[in-house]
Image (spheres, rainbow, N blue to C red):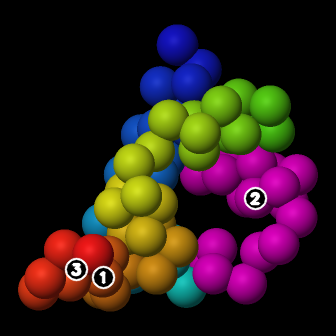
Amino acid sequence: MVQDSAASFFKAVKNDQALQQNFKAITDPSTFVEMAGQRGYSFTVEELEAAISKLSPEEMAAVINPGVGPRRHILPR
């Protein structure tokens, strides 16, 4: 249930430019969790890492670098 909170937080960040800017420079997971808690999301660093491990490469790219999709090759390698 708490992992759902982390997942819903990722969706909120993906869809909100202000959240993206606030969280862009954070490198410490505990600071990330603390700031998410200030916005009403409740999860631990371990639960955050579990939620991150479940993201597809496309979802991760959307959270980390929104607006830039994964690279696609015209011809498969």
- Mark 3: which amino acid? Arg
Q: Which residue is mark 1?
A: 71
Question: Left of 18 or right of it: where is 6?
Answer: right
- Mark 2: which amino acid? Phe
Magenta part, dominant SS = helix
Q: Which residues are magenta?
A: 22-42
What separation in Å lies between label 3 and label 2 (alpha carbons)? 30 Å
Q: Residue at x 76, y 48 (%)?
A: 33
- Give residue 36's position: percent from left, percent from top: 66, 51
Q: Pick the residue in front: 73 or 55.
A: 73
- Give residue 34's position: percent from left, percent from top: 80, 51
Quarter where residue 25 is shown: bottom right
What separation in Å lies between label 1 and label 2 (alpha carbons)? 27 Å
**Magenta stretch containing residue 25, yes or no?**
yes
Q: Residues within 10 Å of mark 1 (few under 14, many from 20)?
A: few
Q: Which residue is mark 3?
A: 72
Q: Which residue is mark 2?
A: 32
Q: State the SS at label 2.
A: helix
Contact, CB < 8 Å: mark 3 with mark 1? yes
Q: Residue at x 88, y 64 (%)?
A: 28
Quarter where residue 29 is shown: bottom right
What separation in Å lies between label 3 and label 1 (alpha carbons)? 4 Å
Nearer the camera: disc 1 or disc 2: 1
Q: Is residue 34 above or below residue 4?
A: below
- Give residue 68's position: percent from left, percent from top: 32, 86
